[in-house]
Image: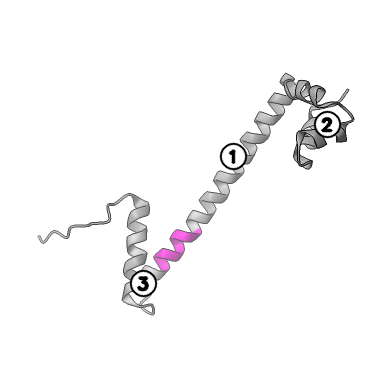
Amino acid sequence: MLSSKDVISAILSTNSRTEAAQSLGVSRATLYRLLRRPSVQKELDDLLESLQTATAVTQADALEVALRTLVHLAQSESVPPEVRINACKEIFKHCGFSSRIEIVDE
């Protein structure tokens, strides 16, 4: 009997369901039946959740690097003023401020 890991590995390592079925030595119909097994569904759900978590972590890391870069540009007096202003605008956009900021004199 094929394990859930065998089925998922075949799906992930081939280009089509037909190839996956062939690599497992079963028909396409059998492959589709295997994919409906609760153990396979749970394994697929766990894998998807793991991938989503890893993606979210990668995105958060990239966002942190991008924001640090923008802050560095905004604070660096060695870059042209236009670059500093654009960096500030991008930081404001990320923080949810509108693109038009009113300056209020006190």
Q: Is residue 17 left or right of residue 60?
A: right
Judging depth in this view, the residue of 38 and 71 nearest the camera is 38
Relative to residue 33, is residue 84 depicted above or below? Answer: below
* Residue occupied by mark 1: 52
Residue type at the position of mark 1: Gln
Closest to the camera, between mark 3 and mark 2, is: 2
SS at badge 3: helix
Q: Is residue 3 above or below residue 104?
A: above
Q: Main secondary structure of the magenta part?
A: helix
Q: Secondary structure at mark 2?
A: helix
Q: Residues within 10 Å of mark 3 (few under 14, many from 20)?
A: some
| Mark 1 secondary-structure assignment | helix
- Residue 16 image-quadrant placement: top right
Percent across and percent down for residue 54 are 61, 44
Q: Which of the two discs, 1 and 3, labels the residue nearer the N terminus?
A: 1
What residue does disc 2 label?
21
Q: CA distance from mark 2 to mark 1?
A: 27 Å
Q: Is residue 97 left or right of residue 30?
A: left
Asked if residue 2 lies left or right of residue 102, the reply is: right
76 left or right of 31?
left
Q: Identify which residue is drawn at 34% across, 70% down.
A: 84
